[in-house]
Amino acid sequence: MEYNVYLLATDPNNPCRDVIHSRDTELKIRVSCLDSDTFVANPNEIQLFGYANKKLYAFETIDIAAEDALDVVGAIQWYADYIEYPEMEILPEDPRPGQNIAM
């Protein structure tokens, strides 16, 4: 079984703004903390959400290619391990009250 290798680009000015990069594919996922960041979903990208350490995270792909779509959950699971919260539940919809439901 092959495993993807992921790399993390961090923003030195914002510890809650990361980008997950796949080493072997073109997959990139922007990470935002919804407690402190404004998040506007791009309708052309995949968005998933998760709680960790009492923070709500949004994960949004960047220029997603069809062949990379199946790796999105694995990349988020890698990130959950990275932030030492492997039990993060990955949610398909924004759980905040009044947010639009994913289509």
Image (spheres, rainbow, N blue to C red):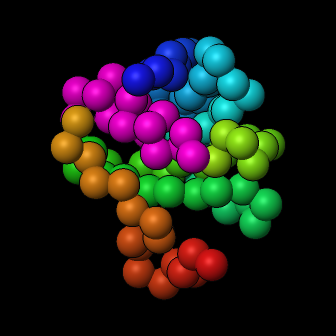
Q: Position of residue 20 (x, y in %)?
A: 56, 28
| Quadrant assignment, res 9 | top right
Magenta residues, as a range? Answer: 70-85
Q: Is 72 colored magenta in this rendering?
A: yes
Q: Position of residue 91 (x, y in %)?
A: 39, 62
Considering depth in this image, is 11 or 4 the residue closer to the camera? 4
Q: Nearer the viewer, residue 39 or 78?
A: 78
Which residue is pictured at 75% across the width and 48% down the height? 66
Looking at the image, is 95 positioned above or below residue 38? below
Residue 76 appears in the figure: yes
Residue 94 image offset from top left, x and y in percent: 47, 69
The residue lying at 26 percent from left, 47 percent from top is: 88
The answer to whether 91 is drawn above or below residue 100 in the figure is above
Q: Quadrant of the N terminus?
A: top left
Which residue, as the protein is rendered here, is positioned at the far bottom?
A: 98
- Judging depth in this view, the residue of 62 and 13 nearest the camera is 62
Q: Quadrant of residue 24?
A: top right
